[in-house]
Image: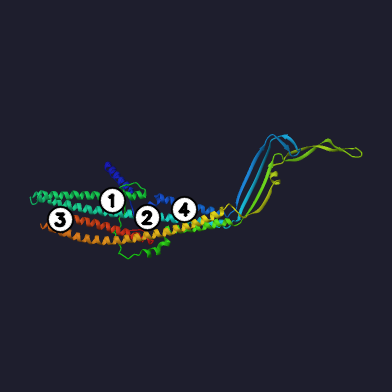
């Protein structure tokens, strides 16, 4: 009883772990995972974060800059005593403290234009991030569709193999009964081997398409992972598409065009920044400071110590004396000195550029060239987009034509296979005729599936250009 219970619990645990390990990915999950793991996307996100800081820094340039400083120094050896004005050997400690402030009041609107420039740069990187996301989504959608197509091709190959094996089993019985030759039976076994090889190739292609998708998502290939199979995908009805009309309708909303546009605006703003160097600059500055010295003394008292003769009178020759005192002192306290020595100043500074070795002129001319280059890049981005749309429209038209032809061929080969099978079973056709009809039918079905998925993918590309969400 206990052994049976343990076996049941172990089986249940194994099933639970297996079920938890399995994961079925739909297209949205695949795109999200690929975006998270893609290094190009990570680089774009980090660039966006860096440029966000650049915008913050540019705005901070409108604020004043405030800095504090402090020093402590020691003078050793022979120094002048400021109270006796005599040399003495002593160690003097001193401190200086100050706070300086500087504020740019006007610099030719360079600060304001720098803020705009950094904002355009940030918007360009954000558009680049969207472009990377779109490219990844389109790539993953194509890989996802490839798996769906290969799964159907595997299913078709399996059906063909089962039909060949069933036919081989039937011919084996007929051979044993002496109704057909051994050669006819061996011919059918050869067909079974060919169909087995076709199935192996189809399964290999399916595994490879899974591997490509898992690599795009940066996950380890694992048989427990699979993709969700949507309901049968049917191509939309063919509609006339004009590349110019599509381009005119979407180009302003495409992130690659937005990025190029923002960089053109950035270059124009940089030109204004360079031109601002030609204008005067007005600054405001201020400073507060104080200091301390160990030689600073306060007189606390004195003692009379006689007289010093300093001269005689001109007529009477009387001696002129002055009293001599010994002063009692103490070092002025640190806080009192900082308070007594506290000083303040502020002012304005005006800088007028007159001649700077053509540096400003060169910077302006180079900024104009960069603006022209950005305009060329914008025109190139528009042309590249238009060419991509043209190619997508042509690819769609070709896919629609191929799909219609493949569908017609599949219907004809399917009917031919049914007729050939009936004729062969009634002895009106040879095994070779039947195998040829079967091979043509399988090939036409494979071609039909491939053209169907190609048409669906081409339609999705046009829809994606039109701004529609990628989904099946």
The residue tagged with tag 3: helix, strand or loop?
helix
Cα separation, mark 1 vs mark 4, equals 38 Å
For the C terminus, which image quadrant? bottom left
At x 36% / y 50%, what residue is drawn?
A: 217
**How many numbered circles does the render carry?**
4
**Residue 355 picture location, percent across and down:** 60, 53
At x 20% / y 61%, what residue is drawn?
A: 412
Of the numbered discs 3 and 2, the one sitting upstream in the chain is: 2
The residue tagged with tag 4: helix, strand or loop?
helix
In this view, the residue farthest toward the left is 178
Q: Which residue is mark 3?
A: 434
Q: Which residue is mark 2?
A: 137
Residue 229 is marked as none
In this view, the residue farthest toward the front is 357
Cα separation, mark 3 vs mark 2, equals 45 Å
Q: Is residue 430 left or right of residue 231?
A: left
Cα separation, mark 2 vs mark 4, equals 20 Å
Local packing at callout 2 (Cα closer than 10 Å; few below 14, some 14-19, many 20+) is many
The residue tagged with tag 1: helix, strand or loop?
helix
Q: Which residue is mark 4?
A: 48
**Residue 115 picture location, percent across and down:** 53, 56
Local packing at callout 3 (Cα closer than 10 Å; few below 14, some 14-19, many 20+) is many
Residue 206 is marked as 1
At x 12% / y 58%, what residue is drawn?
A: 423
* Residue 14 makes an appearance in the image: yes
Cα separation, mark 1 vs mark 3, equals 29 Å
Do the residues bearing badges 3 and 2 touch, measured as CB atoms within 8 Å? Answer: no
Nearer the observer, 400 or 340: 400
């Amino acid at each position: 009883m206990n052994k049976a219970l343990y076996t049941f619990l172990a089986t249940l645990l194994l099933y639970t772990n297996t079920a938890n390990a399995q994961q079925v990915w739909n297209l949205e999950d695949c795109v999200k995972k690929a975006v998270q793991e893609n290094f190009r996307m990570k680089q774009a996100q980090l660039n966006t974060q860096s440029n966000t800081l650049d915008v913050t820094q540019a705005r901070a340039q409108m604020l004043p800059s405030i800095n504090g400083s402090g020093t402590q120094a020691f003078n050793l050896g022979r120094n002048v005593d400021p109270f006796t004005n005599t040399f003495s050997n002593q160690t003097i400690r001193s401190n200086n403290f100050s706070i300086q402030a500087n504020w740019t009041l006007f610099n030719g609107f360079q600060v304001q234009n720098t803020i705009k420039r950094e904002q355009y740069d940030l918007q360009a990187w954000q558009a680049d991030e969207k472009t990377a996301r779109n490219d990844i989504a389109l790539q993953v959608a194509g890989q996802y569709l490839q798996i769906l197509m290969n799964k159907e091709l595997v299913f078709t190959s399996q059906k063909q193999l089962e039909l060949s094996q069933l036919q081989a089993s039937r011919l084996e019985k007929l051979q044993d009964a002496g109704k057909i030759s051994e050669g006819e039976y061996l011919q059918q076994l050869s067909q079974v081997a060919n169909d087995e090889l076709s199935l192996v190739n189809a399964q290999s292609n399916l595994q490879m398409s899974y591997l490509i998708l898992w690599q795009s998502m940066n996950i380890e290939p694992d048989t427990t992972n699979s993709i969700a199979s949507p309901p049968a995908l049917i191509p939309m009805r063919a509609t006339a598409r004009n590349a110019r009309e599509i381009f005119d309708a979407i180009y302003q909303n495409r992130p690659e065009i937005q990025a190029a546009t923002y960089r053109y605006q950035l270059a124009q703003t940089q030109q204004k920044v360079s031109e601002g160097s030609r204008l005067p600059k007005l600054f405001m500055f201020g400073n507060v400071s104080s200091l301390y010295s160990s030689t600073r003394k306060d007189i606390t008292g004195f003692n009379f110590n006689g007289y010093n003769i300093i001269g005689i009178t001109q007529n009477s020759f009387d001696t002129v004396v002055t009293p001599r005192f010994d002063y009692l002192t103490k070092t002025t306290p640190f806080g009192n000195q900082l308070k007594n020595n506290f000083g303040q100043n502020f002012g304005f500074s005006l800088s007028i550029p007159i001649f700077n070795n053509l540096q400003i002129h060169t910077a302006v001319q180079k900024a104009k060239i960069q603006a022209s280059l950005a305009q060329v890049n914008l025109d190139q981005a528009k042309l590249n987009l238009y060419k991509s749309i043209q190619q997508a429209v042509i690819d769609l038209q070709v896919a629609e034509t191929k799909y219609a032809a493949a569908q017609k061929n599949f219907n004809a080969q399917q009917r031919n296979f049914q007729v050939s099978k009936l004729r062969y079973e009634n002895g009106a056709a040879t095994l070779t005729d039947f195998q040829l009809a079967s091979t043509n039918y399988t090939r036409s079905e494979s071609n039909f599936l491939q053209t169907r998925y190609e048409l669906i993918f081409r339609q999705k590309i046009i829809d994606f250009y039109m701004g529609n969400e990628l989904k099946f």
